[in-house]
Image (spheres, rainbow, N blue to C red):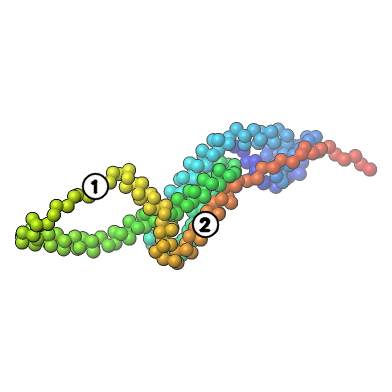
Amino acid sequence: MSTFGLNPAASGGQCQFCHQGIGGTYYRVNESMACPSCVDRARNERAQDAPAAFVRAITAGIGAAVVGLIGYALIAIILQGWVIAIMSIGVGFLIGTAMMKASKGVGGRRYQIAAVLLTYAAVSMSAIPIWIYFGNQHHTQQTERQKLEAEQRQLEEESGQQQQRPAQRPASALSIGQWLARVALLGLASPFLQLQASPAAAIGLIILFVGMRMAWKIAAGHPFEVYGPFDNAPQPAR
């Protein structure tokens, strides 16, 4: 798609898009002078590319969300603290900008909704790798605890107490799909779970909403307003 809607500055008697001289009639695309053929082409491109533009925008938005998730998690792991929630604004900006670049400026309500959802998903799901990382920090303590439990069971077996204990049903193993679904739900709920754990997490939740607002604003797209036609004929001398 061409660069219509990008608000270039007008340049005298030339079409700002094809850079050809303006004839007897011209239009204004936003604030830019345009010839009739370029205006017609711009209208057709925006109408024909709308479905494809949305697909491109969603694809780019998902990619930006993944990058934002990874970046948010890495910075949170390195620096720690709720102040990292400011990254939510950067994630919203990244997703909204990527979507608009992919759609070449075409935006609207469905783009905005998608950008907001992707921003929330990226920031909230970043809690999963963060939890995994810090969970591994306690791996040594968990290993020691398991070692003590194994020694206790061995003592029970030697004393004959193991036979007196009622048989326990083994815990049913979760399938990969069930595990992934639970992890995804836990990640999506993480901003509110953190709020329950600590009231200070409300600051991070507010900043997340600011990031979502940023994505919403950017995904509105560039305005495309056509004014005219106007007569370009020279005025008679008085």
Residue type for callout 2:
Phe
Residue neighbourhood size for the residue with mark 1, other residues' Cα within 10 Å, grouped as few (<14), some (14–19), many (≥20): few
Around disc 2, counting alpha carbons within 10 Å, would you say few (fewer than 14), some (14 to 19), or many (20 or more)? some
- The label shown at residue 89 is none
Q: Residue furthest right?
A: 238
In percent of width and height, residue 26 lies at 76, 37
Q: Position of residue 10 (x, y in %)?
A: 72, 45
State the separation of the CA atoms marked 2 and 1.
39 Å
Q: Is residue 142 left or right of residue 93?
A: left
* Res 79 visible: no
Locate residue 200: give its quadrant: bottom left
In contact (CB < 8 Å): disc 2 and disc 1: no
Residue at x 77%, y 37% (from the top left corner): 229
Residue 141, picture quadrant? bottom left
Q: Observer-nearest residue: 226 or 231?
A: 226
Amino acid on which the number 1 mark rests in the picture: Ser
Q: Which residue is mark 2?
A: 209
Q: Please name the residue that numbered disc 1 is placed on.
A: 172
Of the 4 image quadrants, the one containing the N terminus is top right
Q: Earlier in the sequence, mark 2 or mark 1?
A: 1
